[in-house]
């Protein structure tokens, strides 16, 4: 048994069995057996967004006999691991009563939420938010709520040169956007501080390191004092400030939960039952981010993806989101022969710039493949590789081509999430929605949530806009 599975179950079913005996468990055995079955396979989810649309993202051909266009030609060796989705519309934009303008800021909150954008009180167009959580954070929260699937970190939210403009993409809950961490060095320190890969993959038994336990206790004491101070202040402030204060307290509660988890891991690492090898946990080395702007941009992204992959390998988290820049950037890619800024490619001389948009999409497709190949290179105990348990969602805040299209958005899924998703498919849902047009993008997110095992959910995003799980998507 791998250490990962050991510490997932150590404080759940086994504790109950020891504490009250098998005889008393008779009424609950079906539930426990179902729980045991659901914990056999770890599932992981990554969301990647790239800016300004993806040119020619849809392949040609039929469901099982399709070919990638030039933009995604580098995906050919991995074709059997990929699901292409056509006909996903932003119905929360197209059918919104309080419709935002169609630029780069107001619609971004719809991208991963499938929910209506919320107009800010000050009407600042960069402060529009979402009425509901994003798919990555919904999955992360469901995993976090269950002790058997809780990891040290709820999720990774990483960025590559993301600025404040048009960046409100990720939501823990309504009107609560989360900012990505742009610096790989900061994210690396946060994820791997104090980690000893030797103990993660199996220790020799004994007692927890007293120094580790003392450090955890000291950090908890600081949090206890802060919480007490904030609670006292909370009784003397107005309603608006109470909302902000509750957000601070919720953040502290999440840190406390993580510290509890670290204490459990310290005990598990010392337990002789944890001596068997699990996933290939290691701490990644960061690449030197020097050179041209293009090389720097690429290396920053690769560093972020290395951190994501190794965090999965160490089971520090099972959900990650990577946002590549913002839609108004003017980045150029000389290695592809592109000397026109990306934003200009979509608005100026649109027909003449199609070749540049194809080459820019190729550049980003190669970045997505970096993570695919990285996950395929890391063994996952007896379960193949990390890629086998993962699904990567790649999309953009606009449709392909010029302008800001909100219909037929580009969606590519790489990986089967432990065999839950049918791969090697091109599923085209144009004109199949309830209004005779495409499907609500929330239906795709609902399908991914079901692939994770949360089949109790019946809709995602705005419930009145969707038609349910996508047919042919799940196995």
Image: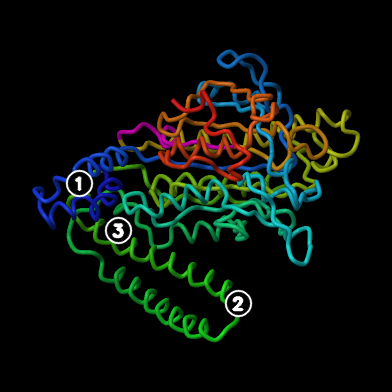
Quarter where residue 179 is shown: bottom right
According to the image, label 2 marks what residue?
Answer: 241
Between marks 3 and 1, how big is the CA–CA gap? 27 Å
Of residues 281 and 156, the one nearer the viewer is: 156
Relative to 61, say whether 233 is above or below.
below
Numbered range of the magenta stretch: 382-393
Distance of label 3 from label 2 (alpha carbons):
36 Å
| Labels 3, 2: front one | 2
Comparing 198 with 305, the one in front is 305
Residue 197 versus residue 5: which sits nearer the camera? 5
Residue 332, given in percent of the width and then of the height, sits at: 78, 41
Q: Residues within 10 Å of mark 3 (few under 14, many from 20)?
A: many
Residue 376: quarter of image:
top left
Q: Which residue is mark 1?
A: 28
Q: Position of residue 343 (x, y in %)?
A: 81, 43
Question: Tag 1 or tag 3, which sits nearer the N-term?
Answer: 1
Residue 345 x/y as whole percent: 83, 37
Of marks 3 and 1, the one in the foreground: 1
Q: Which residue is mark 3?
A: 265
Disc 2/disc 1 C-alpha distance (Å) = 44 Å
């Amino acid at each position: 048994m791998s250490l990962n599975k050991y510490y997932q179950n150590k404080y759940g079913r086994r504790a109950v069995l020891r504490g009250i005996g098998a005889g008393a468990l008779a009424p609950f055995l079906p539930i426990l057996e179902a729980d045991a079955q659901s914990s056999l396979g770890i599932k992981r989810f990554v969301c990647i967004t790239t800016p300004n649309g993806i040119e020619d993202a849809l392949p040609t051909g039929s469901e099982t006999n399709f070919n990638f266009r030039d933009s995604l030609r580098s995906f050919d060796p991995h074709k059997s691991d990929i699901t292409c989705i056509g006909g996903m519309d932003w119905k929360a934009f197209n059918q919104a009563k309080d419709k935002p303008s169609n630029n780069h800021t107001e619609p971004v909150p719809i991208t991963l939420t499938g929910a209506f954008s919320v107009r800010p009180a000050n009407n600042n167009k960069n402060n529009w938010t979402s009425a509901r959580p994003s798919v990555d954070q919904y999955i992360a929260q469901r995993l976090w709520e269950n002790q058997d699937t809780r990891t040290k970190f709820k999720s990774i939210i990483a960025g590559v040169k993301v600025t404040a403009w048009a960046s409100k993409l990720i939501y823990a809950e309504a009107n609560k956007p989360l900012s990505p961490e742009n610096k790989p060095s900061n994210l690396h320190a946060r994820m791997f501080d104090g980690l000893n890969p030797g103990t993660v993959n199996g220790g020799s038994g004994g007692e927890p390191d007293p120094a580790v336990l003392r450090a955890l206790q000291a950090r908890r004491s600081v949090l206890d004092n802060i919480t007490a101070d904030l609670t006292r202040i909370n009784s003397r402030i107005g309603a608006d400030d109470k909302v902000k204060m509750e957000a601070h307290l919720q953040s502290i509660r999440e840190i406390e939960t993580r510290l509890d988890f670290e204490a459990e891991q310290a005990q598990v690492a010392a337990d002789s039952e944890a001596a068997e090898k699990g996933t290939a946990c290691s701490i990644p080395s960061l690449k030197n981010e020097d050179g041209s702007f293009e090389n720097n941009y690429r290396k920053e992204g690769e560093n972020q993806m290395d951190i994501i992959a190794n965090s999965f390998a160490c089971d520090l988290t099972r959900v990650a989101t990577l946002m590549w820049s913002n839609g108004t950037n003017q980045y150029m890619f000389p290695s592809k022969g592109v000397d026109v800024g990306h934003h200009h490619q979509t608005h100026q001389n649109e027909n003449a710039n199609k070749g540049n948009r194809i080459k820019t999409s190729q550049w980003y497709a190669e970045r997505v493949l970096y993570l695919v190949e990285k996950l395929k290179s890391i063994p996952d105990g007896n379960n193949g590789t990390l890629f086998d348990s993962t699904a990567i969602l790649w999309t953009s805040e606009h449709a392909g081509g010029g302008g800001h299209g909100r219909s037929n958005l580009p969606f590519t899924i790489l990986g089967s999430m432990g065999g839950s998703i049918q791969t090697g498919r091109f599923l085209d849902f144009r004109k199949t929605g309830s209004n005779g047009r495409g499907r609500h993008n929330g239906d795709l997110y609902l399908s991914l949530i079901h692939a994770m095992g949360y089949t109790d959910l019946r809709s995602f995003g705005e419930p009145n806009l969707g038609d349910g799980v996508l047919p042919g998507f799940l196995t």
